[in-house]
Image (cartoon, rainbow, N blue to C red):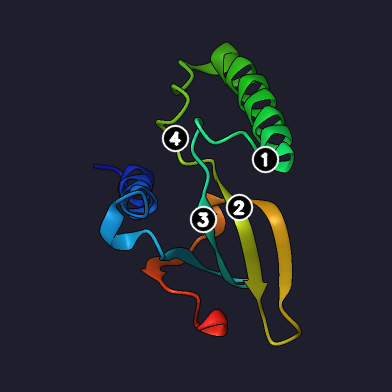
Amino acid sequence: MSLSLTKMAVLTGYANTISLKEFAKNRLFLATPAGMISGIPVFDEENSNPNIAVAQTVNSSALKAVSKAASAEEESPQTGESCEFILLKDARLETTSPVVNFPVLTVFCDQIIAVTLGTDLTNG
């Protein structure tokens, strides 16, 4: 298994775990060079929030454009099989400066150093 497939499998596993009842109050925490990013993974069926719907449309369009460009050079990966990015709602970027909150945030997987689950320590 290649490194990128391993990274995708681990990240997908953690993201999907949040949908289990036992982990419903958890957030996905991603260590990146910019700082710690936390949020709730967004899956295709979640589009009642207008911000999420817009972000999904933008992300889908971007994937289609990349797929078309890649298909000219080689067989393009199927959507969902490559870890290009992960969409988070209620996202938070924590660095040495004040915390920055985003209603929706796209995180590029090549910038993820580590991943874990946890509860939001700032709210209880």
Q: Is residue 101 above or below residue 99?
A: above
Rendered location of residue 59, percent (x, y): 65, 33
Q: CA distance from mark 3 to mark 1?
A: 13 Å
Residue 34 seen in this snapshot: no
Image coords of residue 121 (percent x, y)? 50, 82
Q: Secondary structure at mark 1?
A: loop
Q: Considering the image in quadrants, where does the N terminus appear?
A: top left
Residue displayed at 69% across by 28% down: 57
Q: Which residue is mark 3?
A: 40
Counting residues from the N terminus, which is met first, the one under dot 1 or under dot 2?
Answer: 1
Marks 3 and 2 sit apart, C-alpha to C-alpha, by: 5 Å
Q: Which of pointers 4 and 1 lies earlier in the amino acid sequence?
A: 1
Q: Which residue is mark 2?
A: 89
Q: Amino acid at mark 1?
A: Asn
Kindly indicate whether the residue at mark 2 contacts the one at mark 3 (C-beta within 8 angstroms). Answer: yes
Q: Earlier in the sequence, mark 4 or mark 3?
A: 3
Callout 2: SS = strand
Confirm whether residue 32 shows in the render.
yes
Q: Nearer the viewer, mark 3 or mark 1?
A: 1
Estimate how packed mark 1 is, as few (under 14), some (14 to 19) or many (20 or more) residues with alpha carbons within 10 Å. few
| Residue nearest the observer in this picture, 73 or 76 | 76
Instruction: Assign a secondary structure to mark 3.
Output: strand
Residue underneath mark 4:
82
Task: Find residue 49 and name its label.
Answer: 1
